[in-house]
Amino acid sequence: MLARVSGVLAALFWLAACGGTGSGDGSSPAPTSTPDVGSGALHGAGATFPAPFYQKAFDTYRHLYPRVTVAYDAVGSGTGIQRFTQQTVDFGASDVPLKPDELAAAGGDQSLVQFPATVGVVAVAYNLPGFDNLKLDGPAVADVFMGKVKRWDDPEIKRLNPDVNLPARAFAVAHRSDGSGTTFAFTDYLSKVSDEWKTKVGSGKTVTWPAGTGASGNPGVAQLVQATQGGIGYVELAYVVQSGLQAALLRNRAGNFVQPTPAGGTAAAAALIGISPTNFSITDGDGTAVYPIATLSWVMLRRAQTDVTKARALVYMWHWMITAGQRFATDLLYAPLPTDAQNFGLVQLTKITAGDKPIIPYLAAG
């Protein structure tokens, strides 16, 4: 049923862009061969987590519709939210929806829309040549990042890898120094699997780290891990592959050790019922194939737009991103949005107006 609803919504969006259904008897305009997707230079800022996917998709969209260009500054979720709140960008991006105080600063719930644009997984990346596919579980990861477990040959790590002659090498912990949705996903997971982490550190886009060295953005953490043998950090999967890093297998709630893969992210996202900006966590999910550190990555747009042509460009670009553009996700190691997440985003896009009129009148009611 959800798949059918999403298909209908997508079709109505494109019929609206093309000018109607066209009966041929003059009662309604005939569709044009190329939809009117508006025009203009769009500018966004935010999470580094989805940046490889966004950059590929935005470039593809520019070739499809040359009158629309999209520039994206991968500056971290915190900075992206700030720029969106200051209205210096057309859209913001964060791997976690706005908190109540951030929402109030941005003008309140009635002034903006938020919806997920992709699904990614956060890998526990490490640098230990000759020791691929090491196994970790949530408590062990929490203890490493708390500074309690200091060496790779610690009994807690040996317990999970009994057949591996682990080296007596110190952990070099790397974490984010900036406000980050990736950090939220990672610490949200650790708070679910370690009571000590939940009590002493907690979850958030920024936390007070008990141990390690900070770096800005997913690329910065990947570079820190890459630079030091024994390094360990948390980064979006695409950056692990780009940097040639190793990634640990994590034990999920079903007891299975699973690799970070788009399929594991899809399984985690598909298990979420009733997606919304207040119901969005997909870490530590149930299911034999679920990868336990997965997250939806969100975007935010202002409801009331002043430039009709540019507003059309903004709405139709994001419509394409959460529907047809999802086909670029898997090749870049992201998971396509599940059907209910796509449907949620399509509905949010109907709320955007220009000149007090909805950009998509066919879906304005309700």
Image (tube, rainbow, N blue to C red):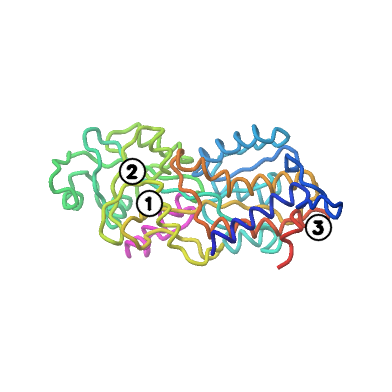
- Kind of residue at badge 1: Gly
Residue at 40% in and 45% down:
175
* Residue bounds of the magenta highlight: 182-206
Spatial CA span between label 3 and label 2: 51 Å
Question: Which residue is identified by label 1?
Answer: 264
Q: Label 3, label 1: how many angstroms apart (C-alpha)?
A: 41 Å
Q: Nearer the viewer, residue 164 or 334?
A: 334
Find numbered disc 2 in the image and state the secondary structure of the residue it sits on. strand
Q: Is residue 315 left or right of residue 102?
A: right
Whichever of callouts 3 and 1 sits on the residue coming sooner in the sequence is 1
- Disc 2 crowd rating (10 Å Cα; few below 14, some 14-19, many 20+) is many
Residue 32: x and y, percent? Answer: 76, 42
Q: Residues within 10 Å of mark 3 (few under 14, many from 20)?
A: some
Per the rendering, the mark at residue 173 is 2
Q: Position of residue 268 (x, y in %)?
A: 41, 57
Tell me which numbered mark, 3 or 2, is placed earlier along the sequence: 2
Residue 204 falls inside the magenta stretch: yes
Amino acid, disc 3: Lys
The residue at the point 64 percent across, 43 percent down is: 44
35 with respect to 93 (left or right): right
Residue 64, position as x, y percentages in the image: 65, 35
For residue 18: magenta?
no
